Image: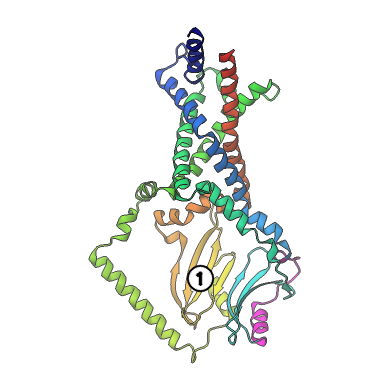
Amino acid sequence: MLYILQLNMKLKSIFIRKRRKNESLFKYISAIIHLWLGLVSSVVVMIVCITGCIYAFKNEINNYFNRSHLYVKVENQALPIDFFENKFKENNLEITSITLPNNPKRSIVISSIDPKTQLIQTNYFNPYTGEKLNYNKTKDLSKFFRTIENLHKNLLLGEIGKQIVGAFVIIFIICLLSGLILWWPKRNKKQIKQAFTIKWKSKFYRVNYDLHNTLGFYSLIFLLFISITGIYITYPWVKNAVLISLGGQSISQQTQLPEEGVSDSFAALMDEMIKKEEEIDEKETENTISLSEILKISNQILPYNGTTSITLPNEKEAWIKIQKTNTNNWLGMILTDYIDLDRKGNSKKSELFKDKPLHQQFQELSKPLHTGEIMGTSSVIFYFIITFIGFTLPITGFIIWWKKAKKAIK
């Protein structure tokens, strides 16, 4: 009986430490919460973080394995866009879409259709020589990254796993905030210095302790941001809270418009559909302007350098659709602008990112903000470092606890 009592006391001391002298009740409770929630959430947090590290480099890894048709040798002068348009006409093929990269090392992507067989093809071309580049489909990594993404989102458990991940991410947020309370140094210079530095020459347990506390502090804001954007995607109530705080409406309000708003929107939509149908009917008598003219007009409306995608009219869509990436902002974020032209090149519709309200901008950017793709490779590398620190926090935290636990058991 005495042995059992002693064992119970030891187990209790492992999970509920004594309150230290001069330690506030708030800080003591924060320490207990940090320990319990950290131990409970550690495995799921590690899985979510490490899969996030891998998924962050999805585009870079895909580009590397498919570099034979994605990258070309830069030469003096690129061929005019008319060259490719004429080349397809000579082969009795109709271009349906074309993507012109802003990077001089990247290939041009062209999709086309054979009017006779209705066969659609997408091919890659050297912008300097016009050469068609071989596309090796065996290097398609989409299945691998789809598995990584599902593991990250739901642990491969479907909707139940999605809720589990969301709950543990909220727990991780609580751990981050309670960790900040525990990290907060006193006002003396020695503790302030220790809070911001890692003593690399110290023993293992001391270095581990510094890694947990110092790296946890430096990555705190970014891990909080990544976590919040993650649960924004998972939980509608979080999405509603963010949208309302940014001046927008909740999801339910967006789908339930007033009768006047519904009638006005419906009338505008019908008017646009009628105009498009009229232009589709005129397809046989009216030719679409050339690709070079489309590119010229798009550069006039959107006067900046960026990757441009052009989708030409077809049997279902009468307008020319142009999508262009814009990095002309102080952070260098990759933003997207859209414009629609009729067959003659007249501007019919435009959606510029800068003109959209804040809540709509956030909705568009929520995923690239969460994955780190918002500023290209540089932000992906930064996100990788931050999420890897998130992966190590449960490990370094467990080592700190295990050392104290072994001491208590002995």
Q: Quadrant of residue 248?
A: bottom left
Q: Quadrant of residue 102?
A: bottom right
Residue drawn 68% across the image and 68% down it: 107
In this rendering, does residue 331 appear at all?
no
Residue 273 located left or right of residue 337: left
- Say which of 91 and 322 sits in front: 91
User: What is the three-letter code of the residue carrying label 1?
Assistant: Ile
Residue 245 located left or right of residue 338: left
Q: Position of residue 280 (x, y in %)?
A: 45, 84
Where 97 sits versus 251, above or below?
Answer: below
Residue drawn 70% across the image and 68% down it: 135
Q: Quadrant of the C terminus?
A: top right
Where 92 sits versus 398, above or below?
Answer: below
Residue drawn 53% across the image and 53% down it: 368
- Say which of 298 and 195 sits in front: 195
Judge whether residue 177 is colored magenta: no
Magenta span covers which residues?
69-91
Furthest-left residue in view? 259
Give the residue at mark 1. 301
Q: Position of residue 115 (x, y in %)?
A: 58, 86
